[in-house]
Amino acid sequence: MASLDTGRVRIRLSCTGGRVNDVQLGCERPDVTPVLRGRSASQAVQLIPLLFGLCCQSQSRAATLALAAARGEECQPRLDPEVQREVLREHLWRWLLDLPALLGKEALQQEFVSGAKSIAAGNRDALRKLLAEPQIENLRLLLPCLSGCHRHPLAVVC
C-alpha cells in the first residue's frame, strides 16, 4: 500500500513595526479515499482517527456526524468533551513545546506533561495555575521577539 499523505497546515505571518498585518492560511488535507474505498461506513468511521496525527478526536467526531447526517439522523449540537480535551492538549503542545523553540528557548516538557495530566483529569484549576507560572508568562512576554518576522515571514508547517 502506498504511504498516506498526512496533509499540512501552512501559516504565513507578515509583520510591520512588530505587529502582524497579514495572515495567510493554507490547509491541505490528506486524501484518505484510497484507504477508505470499499469499506463499510462503520469501518470508515473507525479508521478515520487512525489516519490523522493531529486532532484525531475531532476528525473522528466529524466522521461520525457526517455518517449520521448521510443516514438522515438528527444530531443535537453539543460540545464534545473529548474534542475539548484534545484542543486544549494541542494548544498546550504548541505553547509549551513549539513556541519556546521559536524563541530560542528550551521546550517546557515537564510543564507540558503536568498540563496534559490536568487536562486528562479535567482539572482546569490546576491548568490555570500552571499557565500562570512565571516561566510560561515569560514566553508571552518574549513574543515580541518574533516581530523580526517583517524581515523573514514566519512560515509554520505541521
Image: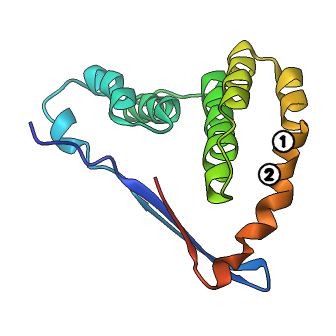
Mark 2 burial class by Cα count in 10 Å: few <14, some 14-19, many 20+: some
Instruction: Write the residue at 86% across / 22% down.
Output: 126
Residue 16 spot, x, y in % from top left: 74, 86
Res 78 visible: no
Res 128 visible: yes
Identify the residue under disc 2. 139
From the viewer's perspective, tell me whether residue 155 is left or right of residue 143: left
Residue 21 spot, x, y in % from top left: 72, 81
137 and 22: which is toward the camera: 137
Circle 2: element type: helix
Q: Amino acid at mark 1?
A: Gln
Circle 1: element type: helix
Residue 50 spot, x, y in % from top left: 35, 27
51 and 64: which is toward the camera: 51
Q: Amino acid at mark 2?
A: Leu
Number of the label disc, if any, that sits on residue 135: 1
